[in-house]
Amino acid sequence: MSLTDPAPRALRLELALEAGLTMPDTGAIAVFHPRAGELLSPLPHARVAVVTPHAPDHAAFAAQGYACTQAPQGPYAAVLVCLPRGRAEGRDLIARAAALTTGPVIVDGQKTDGADAMLKDLRARVDLSEAIAKGHGKIAWFPSPGAALADWCAEPGQVEGWQTLPGTFSADGIDPASGLLAQALPAGLKGVVADLGAGWGYLAGRLLDKAPGIAALHLIESDARALACARHNVTDPRAVFHWADATQPVPRLVLDAVIMNPPFHTGREARPQLGAAFIAAAAAMLKSSGQLFLVANRHLPYETALAAHFRRHEELPGLPGFKLFVAEGPLRAKAAAAPRGGSRVTHSKGRRA
Protein backbone atom coordinates (compact mmCIF):
# COMPACT_ATOMS: atom_id res chain seq x y z
CA MET A 1 0.00 0.00 0.00
CA SER A 2 1.32 3.45 -0.90
CA LEU A 3 1.02 5.58 2.22
CA THR A 4 0.67 9.33 2.31
CA ASP A 5 -1.28 9.21 5.58
CA PRO A 6 0.67 11.41 8.03
CA ALA A 7 -0.61 9.38 11.01
CA PRO A 8 -0.30 6.67 9.43
CA ARG A 9 -3.77 5.72 10.55
CA ALA A 10 -4.75 3.55 7.59
CA LEU A 11 -1.89 1.11 8.14
CA ARG A 12 -2.76 0.62 11.81
CA LEU A 13 -6.42 0.15 10.90
CA GLU A 14 -5.50 -2.56 8.38
CA LEU A 15 -3.39 -4.34 10.99
CA ALA A 16 -6.29 -4.15 13.48
CA LEU A 17 -8.69 -5.72 10.98
CA GLU A 18 -6.19 -8.52 10.37
CA ALA A 19 -5.76 -9.01 14.14
CA GLY A 20 -9.46 -9.55 14.87
CA LEU A 21 -11.25 -6.22 14.80
CA THR A 22 -14.66 -7.04 13.32
CA MET A 23 -16.73 -4.34 11.66
CA PRO A 24 -20.53 -4.60 11.38
CA ASP A 25 -21.80 -5.66 7.95
CA THR A 26 -24.24 -2.75 7.69
CA GLY A 27 -24.67 0.77 9.02
CA ALA A 28 -22.67 3.97 9.04
CA ILE A 29 -19.09 3.92 10.32
CA ALA A 30 -18.23 7.29 11.86
CA VAL A 31 -14.71 8.68 11.86
CA PHE A 32 -14.29 11.39 14.49
CA HIS A 33 -11.86 14.23 13.74
CA PRO A 34 -9.56 12.88 11.00
CA ARG A 35 -7.24 15.48 9.47
CA ALA A 36 -6.86 16.30 5.80
CA GLY A 37 -4.33 13.99 4.15
CA GLU A 38 -5.16 10.98 6.30
CA LEU A 39 -6.34 7.84 4.53
CA LEU A 40 -9.57 6.05 5.40
CA SER A 41 -9.22 3.45 2.63
CA PRO A 42 -9.51 0.33 4.86
CA LEU A 43 -13.12 1.35 5.57
CA PRO A 44 -15.99 0.97 3.05
CA HIS A 45 -16.17 4.41 1.45
CA ALA A 46 -19.95 4.49 1.01
CA ARG A 47 -20.54 3.78 4.72
CA VAL A 48 -18.07 6.26 6.19
CA ALA A 49 -19.42 9.36 7.95
CA VAL A 50 -16.66 11.87 8.67
CA VAL A 51 -17.34 14.01 11.73
CA THR A 52 -15.13 17.08 12.05
CA PRO A 53 -15.62 20.65 13.27
CA HIS A 54 -12.59 21.83 11.27
CA ALA A 55 -13.57 23.57 8.03
CA PRO A 56 -10.45 22.63 5.98
CA ASP A 57 -10.73 18.95 6.97
CA HIS A 58 -14.47 18.96 6.29
CA ALA A 59 -13.82 20.37 2.80
CA ALA A 60 -11.01 17.89 2.08
CA PHE A 61 -13.05 14.79 2.91
CA ALA A 62 -16.20 16.13 1.25
CA ALA A 63 -14.15 16.61 -1.92
CA GLN A 64 -13.33 12.88 -1.77
CA GLY A 65 -17.03 12.07 -1.70
CA TYR A 66 -17.36 11.26 2.00
CA ALA A 67 -20.51 12.19 3.91
CA CYS A 68 -19.40 14.89 6.38
CA THR A 69 -20.96 16.61 9.39
CA GLN A 70 -19.68 19.16 11.91
CA ALA A 71 -20.91 17.21 14.92
CA PRO A 72 -21.93 13.59 15.63
CA GLN A 73 -25.46 12.63 14.65
CA GLY A 74 -25.62 8.85 15.07
CA PRO A 75 -26.51 6.20 15.75
CA TYR A 76 -23.49 4.54 14.14
CA ALA A 77 -22.58 0.92 13.54
CA ALA A 78 -19.00 1.65 14.66
CA VAL A 79 -16.86 4.68 15.45
CA LEU A 80 -13.17 5.36 14.84
CA VAL A 81 -11.87 8.11 17.13
CA CYS A 82 -8.77 9.92 15.83
CA LEU A 83 -7.16 11.13 19.03
CA PRO A 84 -6.36 14.83 19.27
CA ARG A 85 -3.50 16.20 21.34
CA GLY A 86 -5.68 17.41 24.22
CA ARG A 87 -6.61 14.85 26.87
CA ALA A 88 -9.98 16.37 27.77
CA GLU A 89 -10.95 16.68 24.12
CA GLY A 90 -9.92 13.06 23.46
CA ARG A 91 -11.92 11.76 26.41
CA ASP A 92 -14.93 13.72 25.22
CA LEU A 93 -14.73 12.22 21.73
CA ILE A 94 -14.43 8.68 23.12
CA ALA A 95 -17.38 9.15 25.49
CA ARG A 96 -19.59 10.52 22.72
CA ALA A 97 -18.52 7.73 20.37
CA ALA A 98 -19.44 5.07 22.95
CA ALA A 99 -22.87 6.64 23.49
CA LEU A 100 -23.65 6.70 19.76
CA THR A 101 -22.89 3.10 18.80
CA THR A 102 -23.59 -0.42 19.94
CA GLY A 103 -20.66 -1.63 17.83
CA PRO A 104 -16.93 -1.29 18.33
CA VAL A 105 -15.26 1.95 19.40
CA ILE A 106 -11.82 2.14 17.79
CA VAL A 107 -9.25 4.53 19.27
CA ASP A 108 -6.20 5.51 17.27
CA GLY A 109 -3.54 8.13 17.88
CA GLN A 110 0.09 9.12 17.80
CA LYS A 111 2.27 8.52 20.84
CA THR A 112 3.26 12.20 20.77
CA ASP A 113 -0.42 13.07 21.20
CA GLY A 114 -0.78 10.96 24.34
CA ALA A 115 -2.06 7.69 22.85
CA ASP A 116 -0.33 5.58 25.51
CA ALA A 117 -1.85 7.50 28.41
CA MET A 118 -5.32 7.48 26.85
CA LEU A 119 -5.26 3.72 26.26
CA LYS A 120 -4.06 3.20 29.84
CA ASP A 121 -7.01 5.26 31.10
CA LEU A 122 -9.40 3.28 28.90
CA ARG A 123 -8.08 -0.07 30.03
CA ALA A 124 -9.26 0.74 33.56
CA ARG A 125 -12.79 1.48 32.31
CA VAL A 126 -13.61 -0.83 29.38
CA ASP A 127 -12.78 -4.22 27.87
CA LEU A 128 -9.96 -2.89 25.68
CA SER A 129 -8.20 -5.04 23.09
CA GLU A 130 -4.44 -5.41 22.95
CA ALA A 131 -2.95 -2.30 21.38
CA ILE A 132 -1.20 -2.48 18.01
CA ALA A 133 1.77 -0.16 17.60
CA LYS A 134 2.94 1.10 14.20
CA GLY A 135 4.15 4.36 12.72
CA HIS A 136 4.80 6.00 16.11
CA GLY A 137 1.17 5.46 17.07
CA LYS A 138 -1.20 2.91 18.59
CA ILE A 139 -4.66 1.54 17.85
CA ALA A 140 -7.02 -0.47 20.11
CA TRP A 141 -10.77 -1.08 20.31
CA PHE A 142 -13.52 -2.07 22.71
CA PRO A 143 -17.25 -2.95 22.60
CA SER A 144 -19.31 0.11 23.39
CA PRO A 145 -20.30 0.40 27.06
CA GLY A 146 -23.08 2.83 26.15
CA ALA A 147 -23.24 5.77 28.53
CA ALA A 148 -20.74 4.32 31.01
CA LEU A 149 -18.13 6.90 29.99
CA ALA A 150 -20.50 9.85 30.29
CA ASP A 151 -18.30 11.41 32.98
CA TRP A 152 -15.68 11.95 30.26
CA CYS A 153 -17.96 14.26 28.26
CA ALA A 154 -16.65 17.82 28.19
CA GLU A 155 -18.77 20.71 29.34
CA PRO A 156 -18.29 24.37 28.35
CA GLY A 157 -15.84 26.22 30.56
CA GLN A 158 -15.59 29.84 31.64
CA VAL A 159 -12.59 32.16 31.30
CA GLU A 160 -13.29 35.48 33.02
CA GLY A 161 -16.89 35.31 31.83
CA TRP A 162 -16.07 34.03 28.33
CA GLN A 163 -17.40 30.60 27.35
CA THR A 164 -14.81 28.13 26.03
CA LEU A 165 -14.66 24.41 25.29
CA PRO A 166 -11.86 21.81 25.54
CA GLY A 167 -10.16 21.42 22.17
CA THR A 168 -10.47 25.10 21.27
CA PHE A 169 -7.42 27.35 21.36
CA SER A 170 -6.60 28.86 24.77
CA ALA A 171 -9.59 27.17 26.41
CA ASP A 172 -8.13 27.55 29.90
CA GLY A 173 -7.27 31.25 29.85
CA ILE A 174 -6.96 34.39 27.80
CA ASP A 175 -3.96 34.05 25.50
CA PRO A 176 -1.38 36.69 26.51
CA ALA A 177 -0.69 37.58 22.87
CA SER A 178 -4.40 38.24 22.30
CA GLY A 179 -4.52 40.29 25.47
CA LEU A 180 -1.61 42.43 24.21
CA LEU A 181 -3.24 43.01 20.82
CA ALA A 182 -6.61 43.84 22.40
CA GLN A 183 -4.96 46.62 24.40
CA ALA A 184 -3.11 47.96 21.36
CA LEU A 185 -6.02 48.11 18.91
CA PRO A 186 -7.07 51.72 18.26
CA ALA A 187 -10.53 52.80 19.40
CA GLY A 188 -10.86 54.84 16.23
CA LEU A 189 -11.16 51.89 13.86
CA LYS A 190 -14.13 52.29 11.51
CA GLY A 191 -15.92 50.53 8.70
CA VAL A 192 -15.82 46.80 8.02
CA VAL A 193 -13.30 44.75 10.02
CA ALA A 194 -12.44 41.05 10.22
CA ASP A 195 -10.83 38.92 12.91
CA LEU A 196 -9.02 36.04 11.16
CA GLY A 197 -8.88 32.95 13.36
CA ALA A 198 -11.36 34.50 15.78
CA GLY A 199 -11.46 31.54 18.17
CA TRP A 200 -14.05 31.91 20.90
CA GLY A 201 -14.37 35.64 20.24
CA TYR A 202 -12.11 37.37 22.74
CA LEU A 203 -10.39 39.82 20.36
CA ALA A 204 -13.57 40.58 18.44
CA GLY A 205 -15.53 41.22 21.61
CA ARG A 206 -12.88 43.52 23.03
CA LEU A 207 -12.63 45.51 19.79
CA LEU A 208 -16.39 45.95 19.45
CA ASP A 209 -16.51 47.27 23.01
CA LYS A 210 -13.86 49.94 22.36
CA ALA A 211 -14.54 50.97 18.71
CA PRO A 212 -18.05 52.39 18.18
CA GLY A 213 -17.21 53.40 14.60
CA ILE A 214 -17.04 49.80 13.38
CA ALA A 215 -20.00 49.03 11.11
CA ALA A 216 -19.46 45.26 10.99
CA LEU A 217 -16.90 42.84 12.44
CA HIS A 218 -16.56 39.50 10.67
CA LEU A 219 -15.36 36.63 12.87
CA ILE A 220 -13.71 34.05 10.59
CA GLU A 221 -12.95 30.77 12.35
CA SER A 222 -12.33 27.24 11.06
CA ASP A 223 -13.31 25.37 14.26
CA ALA A 224 -17.09 25.12 14.51
CA ARG A 225 -16.87 24.52 18.27
CA ALA A 226 -14.91 27.74 18.84
CA LEU A 227 -17.31 29.61 16.57
CA ALA A 228 -20.28 28.36 18.60
CA CYS A 229 -18.60 29.75 21.72
CA ALA A 230 -17.98 33.03 19.89
CA ARG A 231 -21.67 33.30 19.03
CA HIS A 232 -22.43 32.93 22.73
CA ASN A 233 -19.74 35.40 23.82
CA VAL A 234 -20.12 38.13 21.20
CA THR A 235 -23.72 39.30 21.07
CA ASP A 236 -23.07 42.72 19.53
CA PRO A 237 -25.35 43.00 16.45
CA ARG A 238 -22.37 44.18 14.38
CA ALA A 239 -20.77 40.74 14.66
CA VAL A 240 -20.97 38.44 11.60
CA PHE A 241 -19.84 34.81 11.93
CA HIS A 242 -18.13 32.67 9.26
CA TRP A 243 -17.21 28.98 9.56
CA ALA A 244 -14.33 29.12 7.11
CA ASP A 245 -10.63 28.55 6.56
CA ALA A 246 -8.96 31.86 7.43
CA THR A 247 -6.00 31.11 5.16
CA GLN A 248 -8.34 31.69 2.21
CA PRO A 249 -10.03 35.03 1.39
CA VAL A 250 -13.77 35.12 1.99
CA PRO A 251 -15.35 35.82 -1.41
CA ARG A 252 -16.72 39.34 -1.93
CA LEU A 253 -15.63 40.51 1.53
CA VAL A 254 -13.94 43.93 1.29
CA LEU A 255 -12.37 45.18 4.51
CA ASP A 256 -11.11 48.38 6.08
CA ALA A 257 -9.06 46.54 8.71
CA VAL A 258 -8.03 43.04 9.80
CA ILE A 259 -6.94 41.90 13.25
CA MET A 260 -5.28 38.57 13.93
CA ASN A 261 -3.37 36.39 16.35
CA PRO A 262 -2.72 33.60 13.83
CA PRO A 263 -1.99 29.95 14.62
CA PHE A 264 1.46 28.50 14.12
CA HIS A 265 1.02 24.84 15.09
CA THR A 266 -0.74 21.77 13.70
CA GLY A 267 -0.75 19.47 16.71
CA ARG A 268 2.84 19.54 17.96
CA GLU A 269 4.31 20.50 14.58
CA ALA A 270 5.41 24.13 14.29
CA ARG A 271 4.13 25.62 11.03
CA PRO A 272 4.77 29.36 10.80
CA GLN A 273 3.56 29.23 7.19
CA LEU A 274 0.04 29.18 8.64
CA GLY A 275 0.48 32.73 9.90
CA ALA A 276 2.02 33.72 6.58
CA ALA A 277 -1.09 32.36 4.84
CA PHE A 278 -3.30 34.44 7.16
CA ILE A 279 -1.31 37.54 6.17
CA ALA A 280 -1.79 36.75 2.47
CA ALA A 281 -5.54 36.25 2.95
CA ALA A 282 -5.81 39.54 4.83
CA ALA A 283 -4.03 41.42 2.04
CA ALA A 284 -6.38 39.92 -0.54
CA MET A 285 -9.49 41.20 1.30
CA LEU A 286 -8.31 44.66 2.41
CA LYS A 287 -9.02 47.88 0.57
CA SER A 288 -6.00 49.73 -0.77
CA SER A 289 -6.22 51.98 2.30
CA GLY A 290 -6.77 49.07 4.69
CA GLN A 291 -4.72 48.13 7.74
CA LEU A 292 -3.61 44.87 9.30
CA PHE A 293 -2.98 44.55 13.05
CA LEU A 294 -1.00 41.43 13.94
CA VAL A 295 0.43 39.91 17.12
CA ALA A 296 2.88 37.01 17.06
CA ASN A 297 5.39 35.15 19.19
CA ARG A 298 8.70 36.94 18.86
CA HIS A 299 10.54 34.04 17.22
CA LEU A 300 8.13 33.80 14.26
CA PRO A 301 9.53 35.25 11.00
CA TYR A 302 6.45 37.10 9.73
CA GLU A 303 8.40 40.14 8.52
CA THR A 304 9.04 38.40 5.18
CA ALA A 305 5.34 37.72 4.60
CA LEU A 306 4.41 41.28 5.61
CA ALA A 307 6.95 42.68 3.15
CA ALA A 308 5.63 40.39 0.42
CA HIS A 309 2.00 41.43 0.82
CA PHE A 310 2.06 45.04 2.07
CA ARG A 311 3.79 48.21 0.95
CA ARG A 312 4.55 49.23 4.52
CA HIS A 313 4.73 47.54 7.88
CA GLU A 314 5.92 48.72 11.27
CA GLU A 315 6.64 46.98 14.54
CA LEU A 316 4.92 48.54 17.55
CA PRO A 317 6.04 48.29 21.17
CA GLY A 318 5.30 44.77 22.41
CA LEU A 319 6.50 42.46 25.17
CA PRO A 320 9.62 40.29 25.53
CA GLY A 321 7.78 37.26 24.18
CA PHE A 322 5.51 38.92 21.62
CA LYS A 323 5.72 41.43 18.81
CA LEU A 324 3.02 43.67 17.37
CA PHE A 325 2.80 44.88 13.77
CA VAL A 326 0.65 47.26 11.81
CA ALA A 327 0.76 46.93 8.01
CA GLU A 328 -0.77 49.17 5.33
CA GLY A 329 -1.11 49.23 1.55
CA PRO A 330 -1.95 45.63 0.60
CA LEU A 331 -0.31 44.41 -2.58
CA ARG A 332 -2.62 42.67 -5.02
CA ALA A 333 -1.97 39.17 -6.33
CA LYS A 334 0.21 40.20 -9.29
CA ALA A 335 2.39 42.49 -7.18
CA ALA A 336 2.68 39.95 -4.38
CA ALA A 337 3.70 37.11 -6.70
CA ALA A 338 7.40 37.96 -6.24
CA PRO A 339 7.84 38.62 -2.50
CA ARG A 340 10.82 40.57 -1.31
CA GLY A 341 13.22 38.43 0.66
CA GLY A 342 11.16 35.24 0.78
CA SER A 343 9.26 32.59 -1.15
CA ARG A 344 5.55 32.17 -1.60
CA VAL A 345 3.72 30.34 1.16
CA THR A 346 1.61 27.24 0.88
CA HIS A 347 -1.91 27.88 2.16
CA SER A 348 -2.88 25.39 4.82
CA LYS A 349 -4.81 25.56 8.03
CA GLY A 350 -4.40 24.24 11.54
CA ARG A 351 -4.90 25.23 15.14
CA ARG A 352 -2.37 25.96 17.75
CA ALA A 353 -1.88 23.54 20.52
Image (cartoon, grey):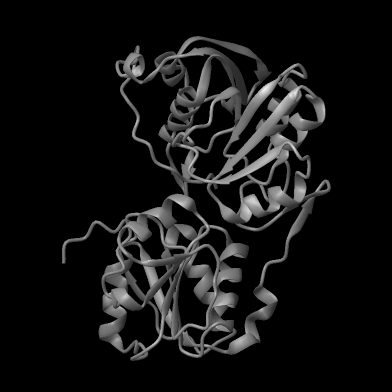
Tell me which residue sits at (34%, 16%) in the image.
339
Left or right: residue 95 versus residue 32 is right
Instruction: Kindly give the residue lying farthest to the left in the view shown.
Output: 1
Count every numbered label the image shows and give the total.
Answer: 0
- Image coordinates of residue 351 in percent, x first then y, are 52, 46
| On screen, residue 48 above or below 145 | above
Tell me which residue sits at (39%, 78%) in the image.
131
Along the line of sight, which residue is nearer the eye, 176 or 310? 310
Tell me which residue sits at (55%, 82%) in the image.
100
Left or right: residue 167 versus residue 119 is right
- Image coordinates of residue 258 in percent, x first then y, are 59, 26
- Image coordinates of residue 338 in percent, x first then y, are 30, 15
- Image coordinates of residue 21 in percent, x first then y, are 34, 87
Tell me which residue sits at (53%, 31%) in the image.
253
| On screen, residue 115 above or below 174 | below
Looking at the rendering, in which quadrant would you find the N terminus?
Answer: bottom left
Q: Quadrant of residue 147?
A: bottom right
| On screen, residue 262 above or below 306 | below
